[in-house]
Amino acid sequence: MRPTDRFSPFFTGRAPINFDAISPLPAYQFVYSLPPDQIRRLAYFFNGTSQRVISRPVHDALAKAIVRWRERFWNREQPVILASIPLGNSLLVRDTRAVALEEFCVLEGDEARVLHTASSPIRLERLVADHGAERVESLLSRGFMVRGGDQVLSVVKEHGWQVRDASQLQEQPCGTLRAVSLPVSTMDN
């Protein structure tokens, strides 16, 4: 069950995945002694249910995958790394993720510039126009960039940034990045 309100896209049917059933919150029946159809017209808050949103088996599998990811991500002996170090106009990328195609690779010239350009969200169409579809697709297929709608973003940690470790979770629960003092990359020139 998921709470929703009268003007939510879930209630109005405009959401990509809608509820199978929507009913007023149970508290309304204790406040108003009205028939259910009148309470439904009066109510603002509702509970929605849907097997299409997420089923119990999918939920359980997802929860287990999250636990495995957390154990792997915060492993001090073998931390997950997806980071780059500049080598002139190239980048040395280290990738220790379970999905990595290879642990080390060198991105030359334009491929390195594509990754640097995508360090902030950028429209896929513009990136392809500026650098070519083959280069962009290569980086997407290796998992060095992710696509969200019509934009892409590099997920390779650039030289000069450090991920907060598990002991700092109280301060930053999401494990955000922080700047460290290191020489500036030649990519910035």
Image (cartoon, rainbow, N blue to C red):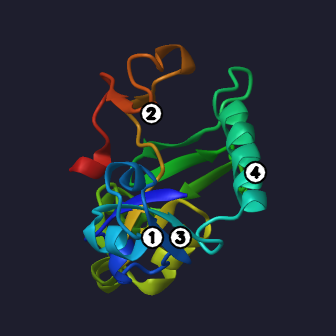
> Which residue corresponds to the image point at 45% horizontal and 70% vertical from the top-left?
147
Question: What SS does tag 4 mark?
Answer: helix
How busy is the neighbourhood of tag 2: few (under 14 within 10 Å), some, or many (20 plus)? Answer: few
At label 1, the amino acid type is: Arg
Residue furthest left as drawn? 189
Q: Nearer the viewer, mark 4 or mark 3?
A: 4
The image quarter containing residue 162 is top left
CB atoms of marks 4 and 1 within 8 Å: no
How busy is the neighbourhood of tag 3: few (under 14 within 10 Å), some, or many (20 plus)? Answer: some
**Residue bearing mark 1:** 147
Q: Position of residue 107 (x, y in %)?
A: 52, 59
**Horizontal side, residue 20 vs residue 57: left or right:** left
- Return the mark for residue 174: 2
Separation (CA) of disc 2 from disc 4: 22 Å
Question: What SS does tag 3 mark?
Answer: helix
Q: Nearer the viewer, residue 81 or 84?
A: 81
Separation (CA) of disc 3 from disc 2: 24 Å
Residue 98 in view in this figure? no
**Residue bearing mark 4:** 60
CB atoms of marks 3 and 1 within 8 Å: yes
At label 3, the amino acid type is: Leu
> Which residue corresponds to the image point at 47% horizontal and 53% vertical from the top-left?
155
